[in-house]
Amino acid sequence: MIKTKSIVAALALLGASAGATLAHAADISQSSAVSLTGNTAHFGRDLTSVSAGDIFSDRWNFSTAGAVNFVGGVIAVSPGLFDNIAITDLRLFNSAGLSIGGVQHGNGVADVWTIKALGPLVADSYYLQVTGSVLSGANTSYGGMLTLAPVPEPATYGMLLGGLGVLGFLARRRKNQA
């Protein structure tokens, strides 16, 4: 009787582990180029006809021609009371594979992530990677934005300081005349 119970338990364990292997999540990742318009790009993805448990690591490719400051973000809002999607990471990669991680501000029915480069990006090819998983079979989506702002030339700061000096001189001269 004890042998029979052991054999049944072993078969149940074997069946459960085989079932877990068959229920493997599909990788539904994609890669796409973003179109920069005025140094800003909007991107996103509609996840329809997907299954709960599907995972993704979507790449959004772009290039810079010169030194720029970078900021971006992603949001996924699930309609109703249940969370349909989980954004688990947001990263910026350069062509050498170096990355900057994002910061999570919200999790649950509304997943919110932002990312900002601490210094200017140099001319290079980059991609923003959005990683997550689908939590239900309901249609869902996420959307994001990235902005590139040119870094001012050093001569611009010199002109600004020179202009402020002239304004100060004129204000002092006007005060002395009064």
Image (cartoon, rainbow, N blue to C red):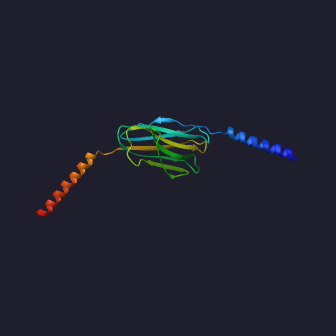
Q: Indicate the position of residue 158 as horizontal and vertical percent values.
A: 24, 49
Residue furthest to the left in view is 177
Residue lying at 42% horizontally and 43% vertically, measured from the top left: 146
Left or right of 95 in this view: 55: right
Residue lying at 39% horizontally and 47% vertically, measured from the top left: 119
The quadrant holding residue 19 is top right
Q: Nearer the viewer, residue 20 or 144?
A: 20
What is the total number of numbered labels drawn onto the structure image?
A: 0
Q: Indicate the position of residue 115 as horizontal and vertical percent values.
A: 45, 48
Q: Nearer the viewer, residue 147 or 164?
A: 164
The quadrant holding residue 22 is top right
Residue lying at 52% horizontally and 36% vertically, measured from the top left: 30
Q: Indicate the position of residue 88 as horizontal and vertical percent values.
A: 54, 47
Indicate the quadrant containing the C terminus: top left, top right, bottom left or bottom right.
Answer: bottom left
Q: Indicate the position of residue 28 as horizontal and vertical percent values.
A: 57, 37
Residue lying at 17% horizontally and 57% vertically, measured from the top left: 169
